[in-house]
Each structure stands twice: as C-alpha cells, then as structure tokens.
Amino acid sequence: MGIFILRRIGVMILTALCLTFIVFFLTNLYPNLEKLAKNQGNFRMSDEQVATFLGNRGYLQPMPIKYGQWLGVLPGYSIVGTDGKLREKCSGGREVDVPSGRYCGVLQGDWGNSTVFKDRVSSVINTRLTLTGYLMFWVLLLMVPFALLIGVFAGMREGSKLDRSLSTFSITTTATPEYVSGVILIAVFSSSAVGLKWFKGTATSAMESPNFENFFLPVLTIALYGMGYIARMTRASMAEVMTAQYIRTARLKGVTFKNIVIKHALRNALIAPFTVIMLQFPWLLNGVVIVETLFNYKGFGWLLVQAAGNNDIEMLLGVSVVSVVVVLVTQLISDIGYVYLNPRIKVS
C-alpha cells in the first residue's frame, strides 16, 4: 500500500505540473498580456508602449523561465527597463536598488498580486474558499444522506413502483441544470410575484450572517443536481448486490429481508457510491460557479468568474492551482478508500 500511495503521489505531482503549465501557457499568451497592459496602463497605448510595459515587468521572458519563476524553482527576475530603472519580481514588480536573486513563487507561498482586487492572491483565495467551503459543507450534509437513502430504497426492490418513482425523481434532478432549478426555486419561494416569500434573505447577506432564509435556496439548488447522480449510482449498485448468490443463499436460509439489506447488502452496495461521493468535491468546488453567480454569493466560483472576466492572470493561476490540488487529492483518497472498502481489490 505504501508503494502504491507513493506512486500515486508521484503521478499527482507530474499531473499537477502539466495542468498548471497548460493554464500558465494559455493565460500568458500575448493577446492576454496586451489586454493586461492596457487595463493597467492606458487603453490608447501604442504597440511599442505595450511592449515596454510588459518588458519592464518580466512578461516577455521565455515561457519556461516565466513558469519556473512563478512556480518558485527559479529566482525571480531582476530587469533593467528601458527607463533605466531596476525592477524585481520578488518586490512585486516595483523598483529596487539592488537585485536580491530570491525565489518567490508558489512553492514559497508567494502567489502574486491580484490586478482586480488589489490584494495578495493567496489572501483573496483564502477568504473566498472559506465561503465556498461553508456552502459545500451544508450541500454535502443535505445531498449525501438523502441520495443514499433514495438509491438504497430504489435498489432494494428493483422494478417496483417505489423504484420507478424514485428513479424518475433522480433522473429529473440530474437532467435539470442548476441555473434552471435555481431560477425556479427563486421564482416560487422567494419572489413576491408568486406569493410564497418563504425565503426573504439573499445569499449575499449569507456571507456575513448565514441563516435558513438566506442560505437554504443555494444549498438546495446544488444538492438537487448532485443528489440524482449519487442516487442512481447507489440504486444500480444496490440492485446488483440484491441479485448476488450470497443474498439468495441468505434468503433460502430464512434470514429476514431487513437483515439481508442491513447486514449483507448495504455494505457492499455502498462501495461504488463512495467513489462517486468523493468526486463531488472537485465538482462542488468548480461547479458552484453558476449557483454563486446566480445568487450573488461571492465564493470561489464567483471569484473564478471575476478573474476570467477581468483578465486577472495571477488570480486565474491561483484558482487553477487550488482546483488541480483538490481534484488530485480527492482522487487519491477515493482510490485508497476503495481499496480498503473492497478487500477483493489487490494493489499491484
């Protein structure tokens, strides 16, 4: 198991480097850099002025060198601009007297400065990620238990009316995008036009003081979409287990149906949904973009939209690092947990 984990960690590091380099390459294409220069300087800047602006701030260096400096495996740039002034990356691109040759990248905890939020990228991400983490916690608390119950009850009696009803509900929730279900929930339960003003608060106010009125609708919107997928996977796994030979043997021995489900079928049926549940973490982290934008909840998804819409390169890179790490870590936990839950799987 130890060798397996070390091998997977090695693959994770290599994958993370490849993915972050792709994002770095795309965000540092010259049209994006030109737009950044004009946003920071003047929209009427000439091509020569744009080149000077970018050259003085290290943006025109070769791509591998820039990536190494951003990652923190190469010392930050120290450039004498066309104006004769020395600027250094580790000083935030500001003028310095003597170059220090320091390393100041992601590995050193220096994620750069946001051109939109005028703050450290790490500080902004930490604030927004905390808000999204709180939202994810309540979504999982609502989504996972209900999805497992629906899947287990549907799979216990495959083909019954209960199974068809619950399966129809699961398919409907999965087939309905968040922006559709969110608008419907707002129109029905929060709009004065219909008359059911059960939820008077807004998700924006939930960032300061979350309560049932201002926080339940965004939680329910996300939970409904993910609930159907987990329920369908659980139902398929449960239905397969209920037809296994050892279940038939237990029935022939006179074991009650309740004990068959709880003591024999349930544990094996939940092995496959465990992987699906772990995959919900990266989906929740990046899939809340629509819901957070719809409800104006300024979390991690909202931050991603703002960074992309305003060409905030450093913020986009920081968001990509967090997303890649969350995806890879949850995949590792999923693989390890699957091996422990299913003894029939051997690690080679």
Image: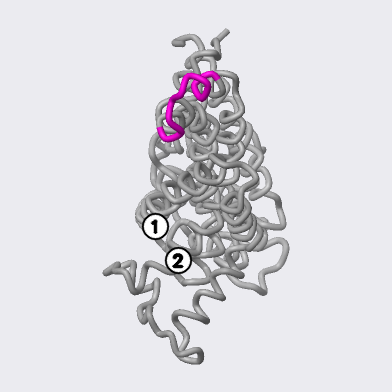
User: Where residue 299 sits in the image (x, y, percent)?
Assistant: 43, 60
- Secondary structure of the residue carrying tag 1 is helix
Confirm whether residue 102 shows in the render: no
Q: Earlier in the sequence, mark 1 or mark 2?
A: 1
The residue at the point 61 percent across, 38 percent down is: 236
The residue at the point 67 percent across, 60 percent down is: 34
Please name the residue that numbered disc 1 is placed on: 135
On whether residue 67 falls in the magenta region, the answer is no
On whether residue 257 falls in the magenta region, the answer is yes
User: Where residue 139 sits in the image (x, y, percent)?
Assistant: 42, 55
Please name the residue that numbered disc 2 is placed on: 218
Which quadrant of the figure has residue 204?
A: bottom left
- Labelled pair 1, 2 in contact (Cβ < 8 Å): yes
Confirm whether residue 348 shows in the render: yes
- Secondary structure of the residue carrying tag 2 is helix
- Above or below: residue 163 compared with residue 185: above
Quadrant that contains the C terminus: top right
**Amino acid type, callout 2:** Pro
For residue 336, the mark is none
The residue at the point 67 percent across, 38 percent down is: 62
**Which residues make up the magenta segment?**
249-258
Q: For this view, does 168 lie left or right of residue 69?
A: right
Give neighbour class at mark 2: few <14, some 14-19, many 20+ (Cα, 10 Å): many
